[in-house]
Amino acid sequence: MSFEEFLAVWVPNHPDQMKPQISRFMSADGKMVANFLISYDRLQEGLEVVAERIKVPALARLPRENESPRAVSRADLAPGQIAWIEEHLRRDVEAMGRYCNRLRLPEAAEG
């Protein structure tokens, strides 16, 4: 499916999938409820942190499966498509900068 088809067909038929992903980690009143969000580009590093923290070393050795092929790059997209992506993913991008790859400990939040 081309990106144009994705925007024209898939997106309108899957509005629930187009909600900001960060909303899955926020309480109803907008507070972050996850202790640790790992960005995909730092997945291995994040898994190592979690594996050490919960004392399950095998977690750090999970294989990557079901990787999506990199068939499209920014250079392949039209300016309007790039603008659509930037607008619809803005909340997630901002949240990643604020919350990802930082371990939030309850004891640190209380102090």
Image: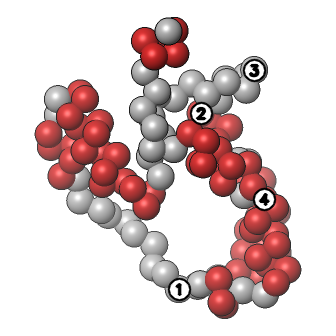
Relative depth, front residue between 11 and 35:
35
**Amino acid at dot 4:** His
Residue projecting furthest to the bottom: 76
Residue 17 in sight in this render = no
- Residue 36: x and y in percent read 45, 34
Amino acid marked by disc 2: Phe
Q: Amino acid at mark 1?
A: Ala
Lower position in the chain sequence, tag 1 or tag 3:
3
Amino acid at circle 3: Asp
How far apart are labels 1 and 4 at the CA level?
21 Å
> Marks 4 and 3: CB-CB under 8 Å?
no
Label placed on residue 88 = 4
Q: Earlier in the sequence, mark 4 or mark 3?
A: 3
- Work out whether residue 73 can be spotted: yes
Residue that numbered label 1 is attached to: 71
Query: Residue 100 or 72: which is nearer the viewer?
Result: 100
Q: Are marks 4 and 2 in contact (CB under 8 Å)?
A: no
What is the distance, in whole Å, between disc 4 and disc 3 at their CAs? 21 Å
- Residue pointed to by mark 2: 25
Position of 68 with respect to 63 (left or right) is right
Q: Position of residue 104 (x, y in %)?
A: 46, 27
Q: Residue at x 75, y 68 (%)?
A: 85
**Disc 3 target residue:** 29
| Residue situated furthest right in the rendering | 80
Disc on the earlier residue, 1 or 4: 1
**Do callouts 3 and 2 mark residues in contact (Cβ within 8 Å)?**
no
